[in-house]
Amino acid sequence: MESELLDLSHKVRSDIIELAFRCEGPAHLGGALSIVEILSTLFGGIMRHDPLNALWEERDRFILSKGHGVLAYYAVLHRSGYFSREILETFKKNGSDLIAHPVMNLSLGIESSNGSLGHGLSMSVGVAWALKQKRSFSKVFTLIGDGECDEGSIWEAAMSASRFKLDNLTAIIDCNGFQSDGRISEDNSLEYLRDKWTSHGWKVATVSGNDISNLLTIFRQTDFNESDGLPRVILAKTKKGHGISFMQDNNAWHHNRLTESFYEKARSEIAGE
Amino acid sequence: MRLLVSSLRVDENSIKNWSKLGPRATYGVTMLELIAENPKVVVTTADLGNSSGLDRLKKSFPERLVNVGIAEQNMIGVSAGIAKEGFTVFASSFAPFISMRACEQLRMNLGYMKLDVKAVAIGSGLSMNFLGNSHFGLEDVSIVRSIPNIQILSPSDCTEVVKVVLASSASGQPSYIRLTGAPGSDIVNSSDYEFNIGKNIEFFSGSDVTILATGSMVSQAIRVAEELSQKGVSAGVVNCHTLRPFDAAHLIEVCQRTAKLVTVEEHFYSGGLGTEVLEILNSRRVNIPVLRIGISHDYDLSGEYKFLLEFHGLTYERILEQIKEFLHTKT
């Protein structure tokens, strides 16, 4: 399993670089590269879903609250079998379904429209509540940025998730340490986030978010995932731009154009040359 | 099309009773019946369940009432998530909170994703009296009107609150339901009638002037028209209960048989019904004098509801004065 997921993450990372280069314009690279392992682990090893039956009622739901992470999202959906390479390569082409923020399209596996930060957790709380109401065993996963935790609506949603005892909801925070204007503020550092989520009634775990084995362990850990009436959050310590040396921890690649020379460099790094 | 659920009979008694209860409590009564009949209906609130007339529903169907706490943005987001799973969700709060505090949530979830959420604005217009401008619904139509894909429904009396809630539920469309008026407000619809979203209801046809009114102002418009008729003025009245999608075809047709138009709304005079009408006339190249009557564009006094309507020229006497002056104006 682990080697398959590693292979998937490798392909997803490679797709991200291809798409960013082919779109011939700026793209959110750093925050897509940081979540490759999280998405690969979820879609490749944890979530119950069926790309051939995208609207399967019993599927687990995934909501990308940090909507600018689309490059990784589209790539993992494509690699999972939701849509063809041809569709994937329409990224940022005029009129495409695949633009710089997700647009709800259930047949493509895209659960919700995002882009404006701070919306995904409220929707996830609603979905999780509704699934419980329907006596469904499906689970809800949502991926949030650490910078996104600046949004007050995240904390409104956080409070309600514990109030409604949504133990079918798992939030993953991509703690890559940066936001648009630079390093995240101290109050969104891992330590503070741990305290904040705990005080909001969530079960909190901290993992190395670019490490598939670490991610698999926490997603499978029985006592963390048991139905005990508590929502859970995984603080995934990642590196922005992970996997490409010159992008890693370099916020210049938050939203930037991949020129040909940088593209070649990134490609050769991924190929292990 | 009559959409009333079996237990909500429209008869003389229920019409009187709903009017006595007022729009908010009528909303609550309607939801109680709707939720009992339709297992797909869920109600959300941001700590204003009692203010929305939902106290009985809370006791009878606690598992179908979601109170997110004082967090309107979260209320709309959570409602959208529930709607995404196939439920019809009614979310209520005071007009400014639901239309402004949660504005972007309305845009993303109801407008962009077209999820089946009904945002119910209680106490819109001036009915929050001494609670002041922080609680008045003065701009809500203009704000929500600017977001595509949201039906805007503005019932003329409590019976129409029942009709609007049930029609909105049956429509499966995202909606903004704007409740104006107060307990004891005038009865506009004194017997059962045909109600369809997007179809104006014309009470009288008038060749001299036609008053287009919405919400609480429909009853005032009817009294004005009756008064004018007695003085030999042919005055028509149209109940514009649906502000989006607006019944443009009917408006254009009215313009062919009336000399002047007046719009009346318990909302800033700019941005709501009057503006909608002007925009339609402009895009259809219809040239007709229009007087817009509404609240002047400022945050003004607080006081008893009746006092405020009087102050803003929204009682039938004041509306009548303004229309008489308009009729005497050469155009």
Image (cartoon, rainbow, N blue to C red):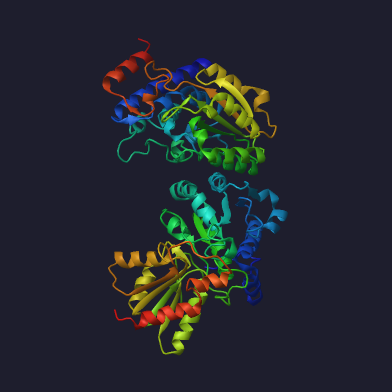
Give the residue furthest to the right: B59
- Residue B81: x and y in percent read 55, 44
Q: Is A225 situated above or below B203?
A: above
Quadrant hosting residue B210: bottom left
Figure quadrant of residue A130: top right
Which quadrant would the C terminus of chain B be assigned to in this image?
Answer: bottom left
From the top left corner, tell me how far across and down residue A2 is, in percent. Answer: 53, 16
**Position of B192 compared to A135: left or right?**
left
Note whether residue B17 is visible: yes
Q: Residue at horizontal 50%, vertical 28%?
A: A185
The image shows residue B80, relative to residue A72, as above or below, that is below
User: Residue A18: x and y, percent?
Assistant: 34, 24
Q: Is residue A56 visible?
A: no
Q: Nearer the viewer, residue B85 or B104?
A: B104
Residue B5 falls left or right of residue B255 = right
Residue drawn 56% across the image and 18% down it: A214
At x 38%, y 64%, the residue is B276
Residue B182, position in %: x, y?
Answer: 59, 68
Number of disc labels: 0
Residue found at x 32% / y 16%: A265
Front in this rendered view, residue B243 or B33: B243
Position of residue B109 relative to residue B309, above or below, is: above
Q: In front: B206, or A148?
A: A148
The residue lying toward the viewer, choosing from B20 and B33, is B20
Along the horizontal axis of the image, is B98 left or right of B238?
right
Question: In the orientation shown, which residue stands out farthest toward the top?
Answer: A273
